[in-house]
Amino acid sequence: MTEQSSRPNRSGKPRQHGENPSRGGKPQFRGGNAKPTTAHRRLRDEPEEKFIRRAIPDIDTPFTRMGIDARVAVNLPPMGIDAPSPIQEKAIPGIVEGRDLLGLAQTGTGKTAAFGLPMLTRLLNIGRKPEPKTCRALILAPTRELATQIAENIDAYAAGTPIRQFRVVGGASINVQTMRMERGVDVLIATPGRLIDLIERGAVDLSQTKYLVLDEADQMLDIGFIHALRRIAKMLPRERQTLLFSATMPKLMEELAESYLTDPLKVAVNPPGQAAAKIEQGVHFVNQGDKATLLAEYLAKHRDELAIVFGRTKHGSEKLSKLLEKWGYKVAAIHGNKSQGQRERALAGFRAGETKVLVATDVAARGLDIPEVAHVYNYDLPNVPENYVHRIGRTARAGRDGRAIAFCAPAEIGELRAIEKAMKSQIPVVGGEVPFEAAKIRERGGPAGRGAAGQDARKRPARRPSRAPKSTQRT
Ligand code: AMP
C-alpha cells in the first residue's frame, strides 16, 4: 500500500473512465500493461463504499475472532502470521474495545501488529478521506529505522485496502513531506523531532488525530524527545485512544504514561530468550522408562491445575497422552500430526479448564499464552537449548507463579548441560539420582559456574542419595 498503488474512488461518486485514482492520469493496474478486465472496470467505476462492502472476505481466523477486520486479517497468513503472539492475544481485544494500553514489550514480540491491526480495523470503518494536513492515526517512533519498519509492516497489513500511510523522518526532504501532507493521510508515522518541525511550518494539523501510538517510548526518552512529546500531547484531541509501548518502565516513563493514558489496560510480555523470574525450576533425574509413572505422580499432586507436558516427538506425545487418558487424566495433545481444527479444539478445552493436561511438541506450542498454566513438565528435554526457555515461559504468566520440572534421563545429560549453559545458571535438583557425569559437572560449578541455582547445586555432595524423599520434592 504505497502511495503509488492503485486505489478505488474514495469520494463515493462514480469514478470517471480513465481517471487515475491517485494521480489523475491513466488508470494503473497490477500487472503493468495487462488489459483492464471486467472486474477492474467494475471496481474503477463503482463508488468506494460499494467496493468495500463487496470486497470483505468471508473468513474466520483467530484474528477476525478478536475483532480484526477481515480485509486486514486476510493479509496475515501469507506473511506466516496464523495465530496471535502473546502480546497480540493480550492487547488486541482491549484495543478493539477502544481502551488505552500500556504495553511492556520489545521489538520481536509482534507489537506492531498488536497496535497496527486494530488501528487499521478502526480506520476502515470511517470511510471518508482525511482532511488536508490531518492524520487520523499518528505513530511516533524514536528512530528512522523503526519508523521505516513500522511503515513496511503497516503497508503489508493494509494491502488491498484504501488505507494509506506516510512516514515523516529527519534526513528526508521537509518540502516533499509538507507537500504530501496537503492531502492529509490516514496514518502518519513520525519521529518526534521532524513532526514538531512540520507542525511549526503549519504543514501538519493534529486536531483530528484520534489514534495515537508511542512506540519504544523509553528509547524516545533516552534520545531526549521528552519535550517534543510533551508539546505533541497538548496538540492532540482529548478524545482519543492512546497506546504506549516500552521495553522498560523508568520513572520518567511513568510520568509520560500518566499524562498520555486514561485508565490503560496493562500488558507485559517477556523478551525472547529470557526466562521469567517467577518460574520455580527443577530437574528430576529419572530413567526414560520410569518417566510416565513419575509424571503421573507429579500430576496427581495438582489435579485441579493446568499443566503442559512437552514431548520431543509427535508419536511419543500422542502415545503419552493416550496413556495418561487411560490412567484417568483429562488430557489433550497438540502436535504436527493434528489438524488445525483438532489443535484449536484441544486448546479451547484446555483454556476453558475442561482438560487439565496438554501434551505438546515444540512446534505446536509456540506462542501459547494461557495464564492459568501452573506447571510445565519437560518430559523429554529439548535438543535445541533455547526451546527450554521458550517452553517454561508457558507458565508464570500475567504475574502468576509457575513451576517447571525437567525430567532428565541418563541419555539426556548433554541436553541438560547445553540448556544450563544457554541460561548461564544451573537448574536445582529436585529428585532422582544425580548421574555421575552430571554430578561431576555440578561439583565443578557447572557449565555456567554462577547464579543462584549454580551455587545451590554446588553445595550438594556429588553422589548424594538418589531419590529425594517425596515430601521434599518441590512440585
Ligand atoms: P515486531 O515485534 O512487531 O517488530 O514483529 C516482529 C516480527 O514478527 C515481524 O516480522 C512480524 O511480521 C512478525 N509477527 C508479528 N506477529 C506475528 C505472529 N502472530 N506470528 C508470527 N509472526 C508474527
Image: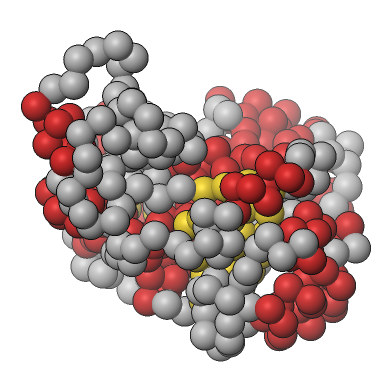
Residue 402 position in % (x across, y down): 55, 66
Q: Is residue 463 above or below residue 453?
A: above
The residue drawn where x is 76% and y is 40% is 173
Looking at this rendering, what residue extends furthest in the left direction? 38
Total number of numbered discs in the rendering: 0
Answer whether residue 225 is visible to the viewer in this image.
yes
**Between 200 and 96, which is closer to the camera in this rendering?**
200
Q: Is residue 287 above or below residue 265?
A: above
Residue 166 position in % (x across, y down): 57, 47
**Between 126 and 399, which is closer to the camera in this rendering?**
126
The residue drawn where x is 62% and y is 82% is 261
Residue 190 position in % (x across, y down): 68, 54
**Between 472 and 417, which is closer to the camera in this rendering?**
417
Answer whether residue 104 is visible to the viewer in this image.
no
In the picture, measured across the screen, residue 167 lies left or right of residue 2, that is right
The residue drawn where x is 55% and y is 38% is 152
Task: Check the picture and name the quadrant holding the N terminus.
Answer: top left
**Between 160 and 103, which is closer to the camera in this rendering?**
160
Q: Is residue 473 above or below residue 97?
A: above
The residue drawn where x is 34% and y is 39% is 21
